[in-house]
Structure formats: C-alpha cells, structure tokens
Image: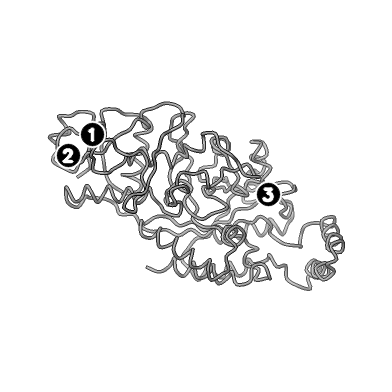
C-alpha cells in the first residue's frame, strides 16, 4: 500500500521534498491529502506533517520553511544528538525530534549558499561556512540517513512497506584539464615552456620536455591506455569531462582543434561517456559556455548534456541557470575542493530546486564524494592514508545505498614524483566499490 501523508498546506517546496525522500531515496509509493477524514480512515501506513497531530498517528513536526516564499535568514538551531544531526528542532513531541523535510530541503536546495557569505580566491562557497561542517558531519550522507530513519519509524508502526529498494552505485569520473603535459600544444607553447625551464635553472626538465615532444619518451599525462585497461577489468562506466576553453591562466589544455585531441575525445567517449568541463573563464559568460559545449558537440556529432565545472567553480543560482539555458541536464560539480564529503548532505542524484523561481527544474545534480586533489593537495595525504579515507566514505555511501562519484584526473595516474603510488589508491577504490 502507498504511504498517505496528511498536510494541511501544500507548496512547490513541500511537493519537491516529499518526492525526494519518499520516491527517490526510499522508492516508496505515496500520496498527500489535506482531508482529515480521509487520513483518519486510511488503513495503511500514514504520517501527518504539521504543527500538531490529528490523533495517534506518526506525527512529523513542521516549521514554516516549506511554506514560505523567497529567501531569508533561517534559524536552523542545528545540533547533534545521539549521533544524529538535526536542523529545525521540533517544538513539541514528534516521531522525529526535528523537521526532517525542512532540514532536507534546506540542504539539497543549498539555501545557505543564496545567503550572504564569504568566497574563496576562486569565488567559491567555502566548506567551513556550511552548517554541516560546523556540526562536524560534512562526511555523512545525512539526508539519506534521515530518509531511512523515517522509513524505520513507519515500518515499526505499520510493518514492512512496499517499495522499490535502491542499490549502491559507483561512478568513476576523470577530468581532462590537461590531456598531455608537453605534446600537441603547439610550437609557441613548447618554446615558452622550455625557456621557462631553463630560466628556472632546470635543464633536465627542459630536456625531458623535448624528448617527449619528439617522441623519444612517453608524455607523463598520457595515461589513457592504463585507464582503458581498467575499464575492461571493472564493471563501471567511466565519465570523462573535457576542458575545451581558450587558453588562459587556469585553462591550459591542448587546443580543441588539434587532431590528436579530437581523436582522444572520441576514443574515451566510446569507452565511457564524454561531457563538457566548462572552463574557468566560462563562469562569467553564457556565450563562452555555449561555445565550449558546441566544440565538444561538433567533435562527437551529438548533443552534450553532461558537465562538471572546472575547479568546481560555481555559484547559485547563476551557474545552474546558465547550464539549463545551454540544455545541460546533468551536472557533476556538487562538492567541495578542500574537503571530502557531501556539500548538499546527500549521496544520491536529485533535481535542482530553483529558489528564485520556486520550482523544481530538470537539471539533475550528481553530488561528488571524493576527489584526488582534495586528498593530495588540500589534506596532504600519503597514498595509504588516502585509501583509508576513501574506504570510510565508500562504506558510508554503501550503507545508505547511495551513489559514490569519484573525481580523478588523467595526470594523477602518471606515477611520477608528485603522484607516485596513486594508481594503487585508485585501483583499491575500484576493488572496494566492486565488493558486495
């Protein structure tokens, strides 16, 4: 039987979050009613959502967030009790000691990122400003856990509830910021790079660069044969995100017109699936974004609907508005560069809710779980320590049957001085993800 939810009020926000928790995370059939008589006579599993219970049902307290319009400062009154993170505590006894629907909506809508906040050097929302960081639970998929806790409460009261159970999903993804370290970048960039090496009194590096350019040695970032071999050994489809922006301080890939670059894009798209990696420069311009998407589309002769922002650089709602205008349907940028965990508190894909327009959109947000640069550059971890962090995060996502999205880069497999030992990190992650 379906779950019946009694709510005296209805809004786009409440409809969105009911769908997220019951349908998308739990796989339950549900229906909402505002008729007290229908609710009281319903013989199946049911819960009420409001300021006070109707009778002796599973009562869930409601604050006002889901029935407001616009954006304002919210008193979340966050805390952790008995190991459970809570926002918007209930003001009277209820089946859950906080408003689970408002708390979930606040996190997945990224409500706090619409409020005034400080940005880092790249214009990004900083992890330490988030409510989950302040609670010390940023590494926990709290929304998934809340949904399972709610299901447990309902099943204790009404017995097993019919549902389509969710399964754990693992998604390896590779950002191609710099397809080759030295090859295929053109004569001017090769001369400039060699001159810079000599100016820095590093003749060995200049020699190595020339040996790679002339085919005597393999380019260190050319790790694609290794990646293709891995894709045959493990049952995961790898996503590749290509940076095709014009050359700039933070956008330094091989020119998209290069024949070898285009062949690489087609090769990896055939092996997995290619998406756009909008450049650092595209953040300020829809026209630049459209141009870069068009470049990838013309190379692959198909429409492009998948993206991840370079440097994970995005701001709400502007970035998501631009992606929607450019017909991107799936974005893989929801995470922090400086710390692993769940920026939106959730380890499952979900539709972006536009707080400006008060509507659910068709942009699918895919939260990332871990990134190589986070572990190596921000946390300064050695490979063995990085493996333990990954194992811990994987186990948390498996426990809630969520989706674990790993972000890596082609140069991270170079096994050079900087990335020595990190192939083992990646392979261990794949092995653990494949375990039942």
Q: Residue at x 33, y 42 (%)?
A: 100
Q: Residues within 10 Å of mark 3 (few under 14, many from 20)?
A: many
Q: CA distance from mark 2 to mark 1?
A: 10 Å
| Lower sequence index among marks 2 and 3 | 2
Mark 2 or mark 1, whichever is nearer to me = 2
- Is 158 in front, or is 85? 85
- In this picture, is 128 found above or below 375? above
* For residue 210, side relative to residue 243 (left or right): right
- In this picture, is 70 found above or below 283? above
* For residue 207, side relative to residue 134 (left or right): right
Circle 1 is placed at which residue position?
Answer: 6
The picture places residue 102, in percent across and down from the top left corner, at: 36, 37
Are the residues tagged 2 and 1 within 8 Å (C-beta)? yes
Mark 1 or mark 3, whichever is nearer to me = 1
Q: Residues within 10 Å of mark 1 (few under 14, many from 20)?
A: many
Circle 2 is placed at which residue position?
Answer: 57
- In this picture, is 227 found above or below 113? below
Secondary structure, mark 2, is loop
The picture places residue 1, in percent across and down from the top left corner, at: 19, 45
């Amino acid at each position: 039987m379906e779950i019946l939810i009694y709510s005296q009020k209805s809004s786009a926000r409440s409809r969105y979050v009911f769908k997220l928790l019951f349908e998308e995370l739990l796989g339950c059939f549900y229906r909402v009613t505002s008729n007290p008589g229908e609710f009281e006579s319903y013989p199946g599993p049911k819960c009420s959502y409001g300021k006070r219970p109707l009778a002796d049902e599973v009562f869930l307290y409601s604050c006002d967030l889901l029935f407001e319009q616009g954006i304002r400062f919210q008193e979340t009154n966050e805390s952790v009790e008995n190991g459970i993170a809570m926002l918007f505590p209930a003001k009277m006894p209820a089946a859950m000691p906080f408003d689970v629907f408002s708390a979930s909506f606040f996190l997945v809508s990224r409500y706090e990122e619409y409020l005034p906040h400080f940005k880092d050097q790249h214009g990004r929302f900083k992890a330490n400003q988030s409510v989950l960081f302040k609670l010390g639970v940023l590494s926990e998929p709290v929304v998934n856990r809340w949904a399972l806790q709610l299901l447990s409460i309902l099943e204790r009261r009404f017995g097993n509830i019919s549902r389509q159970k969710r399964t754990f999903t693992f998604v390896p993804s590779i950002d191609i910021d710099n397809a080759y370290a030295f090859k295929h970048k053109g004569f001017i960039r090769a001369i400039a790079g060699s001159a810079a090496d000599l100016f820095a009194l590093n003749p060995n590096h200049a020699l190595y660069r020339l040996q790679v350019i002339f085919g005597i040695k393999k380019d260190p970032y050319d790790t694609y044969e290794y990646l293709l071999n891995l894709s045959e050994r493990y049952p995961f489809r790898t996503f590749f995100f290509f940076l095709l922006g014009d050359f700039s301080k933070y956008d330094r890939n091989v020119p998209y017109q290069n024949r070898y670059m285009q062949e690489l894009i087609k090769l990896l798209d055939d092996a997995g699936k290619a998406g756009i990696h909008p450049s650092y420069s595209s953040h300020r311009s829809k026209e630049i974004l459209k141009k870069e998407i068009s470049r990838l589309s013309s190379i692959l002769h198909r429409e492009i609907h998948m993206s991840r922002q370079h440097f994970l650089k995005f701001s709400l709602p502007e970035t998501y508005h631009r992606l929607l205008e450019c017909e991107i349907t799936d974005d893989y940028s929801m995470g922090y560069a400086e710390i692993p965990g769940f920026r939106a508190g959730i380890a499952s894909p979900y539709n972006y809710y536009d707080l400006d327009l008060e509507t659910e959109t068709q942009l699918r947000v895919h939260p990332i779980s871990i990134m190589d640069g986070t572990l190596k550059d921000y946390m300064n971890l050695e490979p063995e320590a990085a493996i333990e962090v990954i194992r811990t995060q994987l186990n948390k996502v498996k426990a809630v049957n969520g989706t674990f999205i790993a972000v890596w880069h082609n140069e991270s497999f170079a096994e050079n001085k900087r990335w020595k030992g990190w192939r083992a990190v990646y392979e261990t992650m794949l092995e653990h993800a494949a375990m039942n």
